[in-house]
Structure formats: C-alpha cells, structure tokens
C-alpha cells in the first residue's frame, strides 16, 4: 500500500474556472479519507486528478514516493469504483471480476485465486455464474468493489459508490466498506456528498466548498469544533442551530436576538475574554439540537413557538421559531409539545459555538 500526498494541487479549466484551489493534504498509508461537500465543490475533480483522469494545472501529486502528475492512469497502481456500477451486462460476475486482470496479462491460476478470494470477502461466491441483470443493486455494487479489489492496488478511489442505492442498502454497504477497509488495511479515498456517509466511514474528513478546503480533521473533531459556519451547518443531522444578534454586556455577556429576547452566554473566563472584542457587534451562536432542552420559564431560558413536531420513533425533532431564528431540538419521544405552544429553551453552556458574523470563522480562545 502507499500514501497519497497533494501539495498545492490546482485545477483550472481553459475558461478560467477554478475547480480546485491549492489542495494540500496527505492520505496516510492504510487510511480511509473522505472528501465531502455539496455538488460542484470540487471533490470528484480532486479524486479524478488522483486517478489521472483529469490533468493537474499546478502543484504536485505523489503516490508513495513517486510524483505521478504526468503518469498515465493505468500506471498509477490505483483502482477506482464509480457511482455507476459500470459492469459488463453480457458477462457473468466471475468474468466481470476477472476482466481487468485478463487485460493485464495475469495467468489463469492467479486470476482464479484472486477472483475466489474477492468473492469470498464480499460474499459473492454463490453468485459467480449470474449476469448483472440477475443481481440486486447491493450485489452489483459489491461486484464493482470486487473488480477493484482483485487488482490489489496501492490505492482505492471510490466516487460516490452508494448514491444509487436505497437508504437500507446504503446503510448495509457502509458497514461492508468499513469492514473491508479494516480487513485489508488499504489506502482509500472516498468521495460523497452525504455527510452521514462521511461521518461514519472516514477516519479523517476533508470538507470542501467552492473548490477550497474548509477543514480537515477526524469526524468528531469536525462535529465538536467546526472551523466556520459552513462546516458547522454541513455536518450534523439535523444541522446546528444558529442564533444571531448583537453581543451586549449587561449583567454578563448576552446575545440580543430580538426586542426582549436575549440569550445569556454562560462561558468560561477564557471565552469571555475572547468575546470581549465583539461586544457591540454582531455575533452568531451555534447549538446542536441535542444540546438544547425544553423547560419551565426562567432566567436564561429562551421563549420559542412550536411550529412542527416530527416524531421518528426513538426520538422527536421539535421545530421552533425564536426571534426570527429557526431552531430544531432533539428530544425523547415522550410528552411532546403541540404546534402553536410556547416553550422555553434551555441549553448546555459548554456546548456553545461562537462565530464572527462577518468572517463566519469560529471564535477561539487564546489557548
């Protein structure tokens, strides 16, 4: 296996459109790294540059110790799994798995052994004689994975491989890919627009927007310490609640959201010091749905109006309006309020996130 290193890699099209702006990161040997972001953010372009399917406008790309900027895709020792299964409909599962090896001139014994191993790993050994038309969507995706697996490449590249599957199959295939990665300990770069896939699969995640990297970190570090408002609202379902207003210092720091609606900021000394420079200015405060509660009226609690109640079985999402802000609270599915009720919001003070409203960057303490 091998690492993948990008050093200020750029992709600029002839019309001047910058698809990827100076991407720099390293995928460690054996790591599963996820590229995530909305449509058009440059994640698939970045993957295709690693594969050699897109030329690199500037910067350096290494696989292992070898610079591969000008190396043909077939010579990069990578295998790619696409969004479409791209299986040969007239071939059996066994022939689809073996086709790439035959093109590369492997002997029959080697091909048979590799196909057998891959089929057992992916539980396809009972389906080897079937044609793709006789397979389910999940089985076809496993064949596509198997075709990459038999290559035994240094790096696996997966471009939204689960987007064509239904919700239940996506969940089972996420487990399958995670299990496969643990078993093989191979380097994988996985592209998705689905933040749930990114959070559950990635050992680290690269978050992209408009061709620029917003943050690189482990899933829970991104969730708990987002670098900016985009990362804060992109990762998490439901997304982070945002309250915005003027920061005032009146019996302590408070966020004035609307006339008569204020959020008391119960922060530690280090964060109070960091927020002092923003007093009198605009501030955005973020709270995850699970970090807000409903309770009786009281000092520090925000009045809010219930708009919609969404029970989903093991939990419920309460959609609220508060001073012009739309909020969601995650609650156990018992004794729920009704639409139109006025409720009072509590929160976990140490779970607050603070963002400069002008720059949208996270406000950090000096430490």
Image: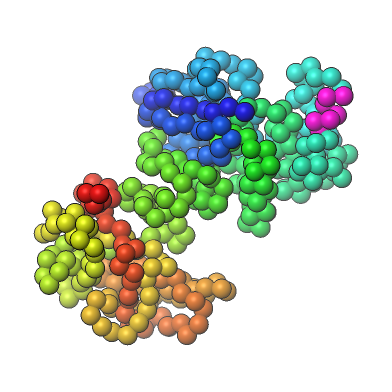
What residue appears at the point 83 percent right and 35 percent down from the top-left corner? Answer: 116
301 is within the stretch colored magenta: no
Residue 18 falls left or right of residue 324 = right
113 is within the stretch colored magenta: yes
Q: Is residue 182 visible?
A: yes
Residue 119 falls left or right of residue 4 = right
State the residue in front, 183 or 353. 183
* Quadrant position of residue 172: bottom right
Q: Measured along the vertical axis of the image, is residue 263 above or below residue 26?
A: below
Q: Measured along the vertical axis of the image, is residue 206 above or below residue 229?
A: above
State the residue in front, 193 or 146. 146
Percent of width and height locating residue 305: 33, 78
Q: Measured along the vertical axis of the image, is residue 106 above or below residue 97?
A: above
What residue appears at the point 34 percent right and 63 percent down from the top-left corner? Answer: 351
State the residue in front, 270 or 12. 270
Residue 235 falls left or right of residue 190 = left
Give the prevailing secondary structure in the magenta stretch. helix
* Quadrant position of residue 22: top left
* Quadrant position of residue 290: bottom left
**Farthest residue toward the top?**
70
The N terminus sits in image quarter: top right
Which region shows up in magenta? 109-115
Percent of width and height locating residue 103: 77, 19
What residue appears at the point 14 percent right and 57 percent down from the top-left corner? Answer: 276
What residue appears at the point 38 percent right and 68 percent down from the top-left corner? Answer: 291
Q: Is residue 177 visible?
A: no
Percent of width and height locating residue 208: 42, 40
Q: Measured along the vertical axis of the image, is residue 236 above or below residue 108?
A: below
């Amino acid at each position: 296996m091998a690492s993948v290193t990008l050093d200020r890699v750029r992709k600029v099209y002839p019309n001047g459109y910058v698809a990827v702006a100076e991407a720099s990161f390293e995928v460690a040997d054996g790591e599963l790294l996820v590229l995530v972001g909305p449509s058009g953010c440059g994640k698939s372009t970045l993957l295709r540059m690693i594969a050699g399917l897109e030329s690199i406008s500037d910067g350096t790309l290494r696989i292992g110790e070898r610079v591969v900027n000008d190396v043909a895709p077939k010579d990069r020792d990578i295998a790619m799994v696409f969004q479409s299964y791209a299986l040969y409909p007239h071939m059996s599962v066994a022939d689809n798995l073996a086709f790439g090896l035959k093109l590369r001139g492997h002997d029959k014994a080697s091909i048979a052994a590799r196909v057998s191993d891959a089929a057992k790993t992916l539980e396809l050994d009972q389906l080897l004689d079937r044609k793709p038309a006789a397979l389910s969507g999940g089985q076809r995706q496993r064949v596509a994975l198997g075709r990459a697996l038999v290559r035994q490449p240094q790096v696996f590249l997966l471009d939204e491989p689960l987007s064509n599957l239904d919700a239940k199959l996506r969940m089972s295939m996420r487990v399958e890919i995670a299990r496969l990665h643990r078993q093989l300990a191979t380097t994988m770069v996985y592209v998705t627009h689905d933040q749930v896939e990114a959070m559950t699969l990635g050992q680290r995640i690269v978050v992209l927007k408009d061709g620029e990297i917003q943050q690189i970190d482990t899933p829970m570090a991104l969730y708990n310490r987002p670098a900016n408002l985009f990362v804060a609202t992109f990762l998490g379902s439901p997304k982070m609640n945002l309250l915005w207003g003027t920061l005032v210092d009146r019996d302590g720091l408070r966020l004035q959201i609307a006339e008569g609606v204020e959020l008391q900021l119960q922060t530690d000394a280090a964060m109070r010091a960091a927020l002092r420079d923003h007093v009198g200015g605009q501030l955005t405060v973020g709270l995850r749905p699970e970090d807000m509660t409903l309770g009786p009226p009281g000092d520090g609690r925000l009045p809010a109006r219930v708009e919609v109640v969404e029970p989903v079985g093991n939990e419920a999402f309460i959609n609220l309006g508060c001073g012009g802000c739309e909020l969601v609270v995650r609650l156990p599915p018992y004794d729920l309020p009704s639409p139109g009720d006025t409720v009072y919001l509590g929160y976990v003070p140490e779970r607050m996130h603070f963002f400069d409203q002008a720059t949208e960057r996270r406000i950090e303490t000096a430490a």
